Image (tube, rainbow, N blue to C red):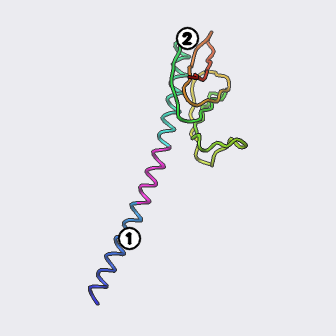
Amino acid sequence: MEYMFGFGFMLLLLLVLLVFIFDRNRELGEAKVFLDKKSECLKFSALLNSLTTAGDGAEAHTSTPYFVTIFNTSLINVREIANISSENLSAKPGSDVTCTFTGISPYYQFTGPVTLRNVQDRITISNETA
């Protein structure tokens, strides 16, 4: 009888530990997704700042697996493509990542390979197609 009680208690401890481990892994996965999107946002912020500083004729080629929106208010928004539907472009709350850049740019939305150019001190962005 005492062995069964001891075995049950050990099994209960193991289950509590497993729940804690699975919850921690879920949190780490969410943090990784956030950091990946933040990194992508900062990549475009740095590219836009570099192109603005470099002046007329500067050009950069890059690619993104995310849906990126550059607002004309020096704000960049990054979200996962899976969060976008044809009738509603808003993602679930908290899933977007934003950052800022120095400079002025027209409104752009893109994903995939893109070319960023400084043409007469104005930033232009075009999607590259294969």
Q: Where is the N terminus found, in terms of image quarters?
A: bottom left
Q: Residue at x 63, y 48 (%)?
A: 92
Instruction: Locate residue 123 relative to residue 1 in the image: left or right.
Output: right
Task: Determine crowd level at label 2: few under 14, some 14-19, many 20+ residues with C-alpha closer than 10 A.
Answer: some
Looking at the image, residue 50 lies above or below residue 120: below
> Which residue is rendered at x = 51% and y = 18% of the image?
60
The answer to which of marks 2 and 1 sits earlier in the sequence is 1
Q: Residue furthest right?
A: 87
Please state which amino acid type lies under the numbered disc 2: Gly
Q: How many marks?
A: 2
| Span shown in magenta | 22-33
Question: Closer to the camera, 44 or 129?
Answer: 129
Q: Is residue 123 left or right of residue 10?
A: right
User: How many residues crowd mark 1 within 10 Å: few (<14), some (14–19), many (20+)?
Assistant: few
> Dot 2 corresponds to which residue?
55
Q: Amino acid at mark 1?
A: Leu
In the image, is residue 44 part of the stretch drawn in magenta? no
Q: Quadrant of residue 97?
A: top right
The prevailing secondary structure element of the residues shown in magenta is helix
Quarter of the rendering occupied by the C terminus = top right
Q: Point out residue 73 in the picture as x, y percentages from the top left corner.
A: 66, 28
Residue 113's spot in the image, x, y percent?
54, 26
- Give above or below for 5 relative to 15: below
User: Which quadrant would residue 80 be assigned to in this image?
Assistant: top right
Taking the spot 68% from the left edge, 41% from the top edge, the residue there is 89
In the picture shown, does residue 103 fall above or below 85?
Answer: above
Question: Foreground residue, 113 or 90?
Answer: 113
Kindly identify which residue carries mark 1: 15
Query: 103 and 43: which one is in front?
Result: 43
Rendering coords of residue 59 (x, y %): 53, 15
